[in-house]
């Protein structure tokens, strides 16, 4: 029996954020079809904790001293590991992209999932040029229509592929008992209106904006508002500072959780208050858990939601926090509408964003690259 193809994944970080969660879902779904090695240039491999069954190992990032150290390290890594296929992710893996290009490695697929705070408002012209040159003979995968337009028009990459994110909706089936137990475990009152958020705590997600908007939102008088943020990262201190400054709303920070179904079951609504997104995995998970969403109008968030839910998507701009507060208040006071939004959201994620469809499309792309 032939040994499974070896895939080398190079990330800037392998923390449990959207791109990494999707990669782990793919790894587990592929089963013994592939074996995997992960390198994270920041040394963070926490997402290994959510791998269920895939054959995955990690290697350290240990570049030497001197100019172009990362590129030289990646060239040596490619010679040492001899992967059947190289997979790189976002701008932070560009050293591996350049190493592959200099080594004329054709079996290479690059993934772009969006931008950090430094490119949330405006793309860097030098990075645009670097992507255009270094990725011109490489397959590029993006999860959103917004990124596909950028890839084809700005970066001029003709081998760009749109593969929407997908999830197993059954994993997030709403469970009232699990939600009640989650609230009790985290000190959340049973009668509270819980506005949840899920993600890696980094600046581009702008969770302090969520705290400030929730503090100004008109929650029902019989249901005190609680903001519950699930995740960990460098912005924890900024979120805690915003909570202390506002004081009008209870804020619960749970830290990183491996299993999220109970958290979604505890939410009455979900908030995405980012400066930049493409197609958040947490958005699909909330829809699968029948949780209605309030969000900033970034990336493909509006297109992913059912049309009925788009009235709770607000534009970025000087009034964004006031608009978010108003949308949160309207949604909190519309129990019947929340039930309808829960129903159509679940239907949409099952019909359009299934895990099986995503796995099949990625599998075809990777197998095609392996044949080159």
Image: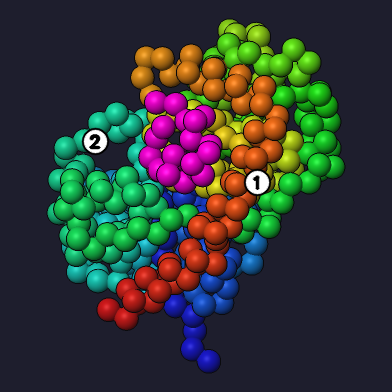
| Position in image of residue 49 (x %, y %) | 63, 52
Residue that label 2 marks: 123
Real-space Cα separation, disc 1 to disc 2, in angstroms: 37 Å
Q: Is residue 336 visible?
A: yes
- Quarter in which the C terminus is drawn: bottom left
| Position in image of residue 162 (x %, y %) | 35, 58
Seen from the viewer's position, the closer of residues 161 and 130 is: 161
Q: Is residue 306 above or below residue 206?
A: below
Res 343 label: 1
User: Which residue extends farthest bottom?
Assistant: 1
| Position in image of residue 205 (x %, y %) | 47, 31
Q: Is residue 97 above or below residue 359?
A: above
What stretch of residues is rendered in magenta? Answer: 297-315
Locate residue 44 relative to residue 8 in the image: left or right: right
Q: Residue at x 16, y 37 (%)?
A: 125
Q: Of label 1 and label 2, which has the lower sequence position?
A: 2
Seen from the viewer's position, the closer of residues 313 and 58 is: 313
| Position in image of residue 362 (x %, y %) | 43, 67
Q: Residue at x 43, y 19 (%)?
A: 320
Nearer to us: label 1 or label 2:
1
Quarter of the image where one finds residue 329: top right
């Amino acid at each position: 029996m032939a040994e499974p193809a070896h895939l080398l994944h190079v990330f800037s970080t392998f923390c449990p954020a959207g791109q990494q969660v999707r990669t782990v879902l793919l790894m587990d779904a592929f089963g013994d079809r592939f074996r995997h090695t992960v390198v994270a240039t920041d040394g963070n491999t926490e997402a290994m904790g959510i791998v269920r069954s895939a054959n995955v190992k990690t290697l350290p990032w240990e570049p030497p001293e001197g100019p172009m150290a990362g590129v030289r390290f990646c060239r040596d890594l490619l010679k040492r590991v001899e992967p059947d296929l190289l997979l790189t992710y976002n701008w932070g893996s560009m050293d591996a992209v350049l190493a592959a290009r200099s080594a004329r490695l054709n079996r290479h697929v690059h993934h772009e999932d969006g931008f950090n705070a430094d490119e949330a408002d405006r793309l860097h012209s030098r990075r645009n040029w670097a992507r255009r040159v270094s990725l011109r003979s490489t397959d590029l995968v993006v999860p959103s229509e917004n990124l596909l337009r950028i890839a084809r028009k700005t970066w001029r990459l003709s081998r760009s592929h749109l593969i929407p994110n997908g999830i197993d909706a059954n994993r997030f089936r709403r469970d009232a008992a699990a939600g009640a137990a989650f609230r009790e475990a985290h000190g959340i009152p049973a009668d509270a209106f819980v506005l949840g958020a899920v993600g890696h705590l980094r600046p581009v997600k702008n969770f302090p904006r969520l705290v400030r908007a929730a503090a100004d939102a008109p929650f029902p008088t019989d249901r005190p508002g609680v903001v519950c943020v699930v995740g960990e990262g460098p912005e924890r201190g900024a979120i805690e500072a915003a909570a202390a400054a506002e004081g009008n709303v209870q804020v619960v920070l749970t830290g990183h959780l491996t299993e999220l179904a109970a958290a979604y079951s505890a939410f009455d609504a979900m908030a995405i208050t980012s400066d930049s997104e493409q197609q958040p995995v947490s958005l699909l998970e909330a829809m699968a858990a029948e949780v209605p969403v309030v969000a900033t109008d970034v990336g493909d968030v509006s297109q992913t939601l059912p049309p009925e839910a788009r009235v709770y998507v607000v534009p970025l701009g000087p009034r964004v926090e006031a608009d978010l507060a108003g949308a949160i208040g309207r949604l909190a006071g519309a129990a019947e509408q929340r039930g309808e939004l829960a129903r159509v959201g679940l239907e949409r994620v099952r019909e359009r964003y299934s895990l099986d469809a995503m796995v099949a499309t990625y599998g075809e792309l990777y197998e095609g690259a392996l044949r080159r």
